[in-house]
Image (spheres, rainbow, N blue to C red):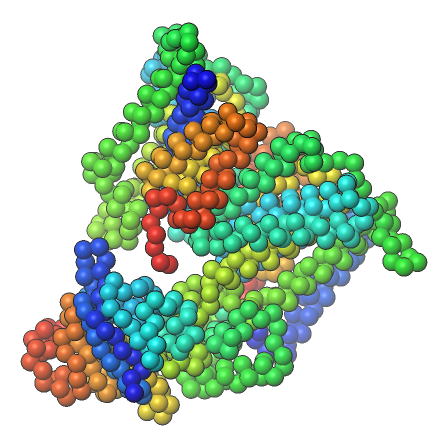
Amino acid sequence: MSVTAAGAVDTARSADRRWLVLAAIWLVLIAAPLWMPLIGGYTSLGTRILVLGLAATALNFLIGFTGVVSFGHAAYFGLGVYGAGLVLRYLAPSTPLAIVAGILLGGVIGTIVGALIARQRGIYFAMVTIAFEQIFYYIGYKWDAVTGGFDGLRGFQRQPIHLGAFVLDIQKNDLAFYYFVLFIFALVVGLMGFLLRSPFGRTLLAIRENERRARFLGISVNRHIWLAFSISSFLIAAAGALYALLNDFADPSSLYFDLSGDLVIMAVLGGIRNFWGPLLGAAVFEVLQDYISSQTVNWLFFIGLVFVIVVMFFPRGLLGFFHRRRQT
Amino acid sequence: MSMLEVHNASKHFGSLVAVREVSLTVAKGELRAIIGPNGAGKTTFFNLITGFFPPTAGEIIFDGQNVTEVSAAERVKRGMARTFQITEVFPELSVRENIRIAAEVAAGYALRPWLRAEETRNIAAVVEEMIGLTGLAGKVERLVGELAHGDQRAVEIAMALALRPRLLLLDEPTAGMGEQETYEIAGLIRKLHRDKSYTIILVEHDMRVVFHLADRISVLDQGALLADGTPEQIASDPAVQAAYLGKAA
Amino acid sequence: MLQLVLFNLFNGLIIGAFYVLLALGLSMILNLSNVINFAHGNFLALGGYFAYVLIPYIGFWPALIVSPLLTAVLGLIIERTMIRRIYGRDPIYSLLLTFGLAFMIQDACRYIWGVNGLPLTTPASISQPLSQEFFFLTGYRLFVVGIVIIAVAGLFAFLRYSRMGMRIRAGVLDLDTVSALGINVRLLRSLNFAGGIFLAGLAGVLAGGQIGLNPNMGDSLLLPSFIAIIIGGMGSLVGTLLGGLLIGVAAAITTMFYASASDTIIYVIMALVLLVRPRGLLGEEGML
């Protein structure tokens, strides 16, 4: 699903290759619960990587494919977390309803904020996204009565899913939950890939490549950036809803801009010009963070160092070197 | 019938007057060249016509409609397409993708999440036509950023043509090109004008290209219109010779 | 009642003064180098800690100047070795770089000076309340306001009248032309960066004297400083100055009526400004 190759009807060989890569990726993901224990992992780590990878991928819709940097996207992730958590806590014990609520809360608010900021560009755009994120952080943090404030929202659990006669017990069975998350992941990622291969998706690539040219082709650049921001908010809110289910918990740190920074570094670490880069980046970053924090109390210093090293020495990310050249 | 009428257009940047009360009329099917020394305001004038920024004073009438207050993107939709002095393309996309984006936007598909099979075929046909017209057939899958300068310019022109414009504005299409590339681009412009009947406004430095191609020539000097006429009239105009041809060409 | 109003206004002015010092430095760096310095609040903390170390040896007054200078030198080193490498690249890289640096400096402070707050001793001569009735008018708070006024006036005078300052202003408007005129843009950016860090360091010493030192002391000031820049209009230092004072005072006034909204009010102002004037109060309105 490499979007770099979108549109062009390539030679049969390169199309074959794309399908092979795609099949391999999905095989690895489906088999993850089998091979992860062999290298010291465990299923819930896999689920966590999948959720954060989905968030970074959704953010990359904006960063990598529209060329617009949001450094405040944890806001819409976090709203997804709270949307799902609040429904389970106060409204109804229904997992699907929780997910829908999370997606709507993050997506709709992202759409409103996007309308306010779509005229900004470059570093200023990033700065305004950070500022808006802070609003939702404050709300999550201060509105004790509803959100549980600083201590977070507890007292809810993801609920088993009823499919007619069959019950998928994602509550007690980690493996079932992994596959449930993988299913949602597939839906969201599939939708994103579909959009990127559409005429609308190509206008976003056009804006990324050269905004002036895009405008003089007749693309309403501000409106398209707004739409991209909105779509990306809906997608990342889905990841947020899954995150609430994963932890059975929602807290303000999921709205904080430190998390935004983590999501951006995941995307860059994996490679923002590659559709699958952010997922790989999320896996590497999570494992690295796990490892560093188990080794030293000064883990924050070394996480900072990871940021610096990536920027200075691997700006194109792990998959950046495969980027596109194979087509020529 | 006129395609474009500019009435007393001026553009001030602070105290600098870049364009001073310029009026001109371009007929349908005409190829008009705009020449003038460096800093004469040619590109600024282009930017006024295409809506890059609004004029300080004056009016721009495109195909009978006043577009003075109309945005750049909307002018494109109404049939104005331009290329830039410094080639503006999508460097990390292929030649085909570059032209395809232009064709899809022109067809009104910019917000479409999918196309019907028939629509896809129509777009592909437009792309093929433009590739054939601009001589890019062997390079469709190459990334535009990897192409030679002349080919990038051809891609830019192909994108402009894919918009199905009624008025094509080319800002120094041969700038920075070698002998062979200049010849090829000039040939392409000639073909568009003679065979395809495009209305074209051309800003150009290379006098051979200008006098070879243009139906009429407008001369700008220090932001003002100095002369306007056929190539023969311009070549023999003493004011033009004094202000321009003698010094700069 | 009058006392209460004055109390809150003065509080707003003090907090606004800190926003202004931090935001002006951020804004200088943003305007000339197109970099958002996430580590700015951590340089503030460093300035405070340097003063903490120096005061026993050289006393408060010399430390008030020397600590920001040391902070600026450290900033200069970081700019020369790391930040300058990402100039002109996609903004994502400068964001990530300074984001990482912020983590590193914060954790280094914690490692060296500990998690717990440390007091910064200020001279008795400026620590007394000046009046029984207006108890909040301590000498130290007036002193803070005075120093900020001097620093801001100094900065604006420097930018307006010195050759370097004029070059910096020209560079903000049109870097290519400045470069074409043979001016060393790299040097200009380095010194400008160091200047911005100096202001952060100064704010650190002043804040330390008021609320004490801790490794996260800059965090709560950083985001409001962003807001000050956005409200004031990006590219305009005068706008940043006004923005900083405005949100400081607005938050303080809100405290009087509805305390729990005082953090939120500045974001409401920001949203309104962006709605009405997308480029900020004094920002250039330009077509793209």
Residue A113 in percent (x, y) is at 54, 50
Closest to the observer: C186 or C118? C118
- Residue drawn 7% across and 75% down? B242
Q: Is residue C119 visible?
A: yes
- Quarter holding the C terminus of chain C is bottom left
Write down the quadrant of residue B17 in the picture: bottom left
Residue A41 in percent (x, y) is at 76, 45
On screen, residue C236 above or below B135? above
- Residue drawn 54% across and 74% down? B109
Residue C9 in percent (x, y) is at 42, 24
C118 sits left or right of A235 in the view: left
Residue A321 in percent (x, y) is at 55, 59
A217 sits left or right of B201 in the view: right
A139 sits left or right of B218 in the view: right
Q: How many marks?
A: 0
Q: Is residue C209 visible?
A: no
- Residue drawn 28% across and 46% down? C171
On screen, residue C113 above or below B15? above
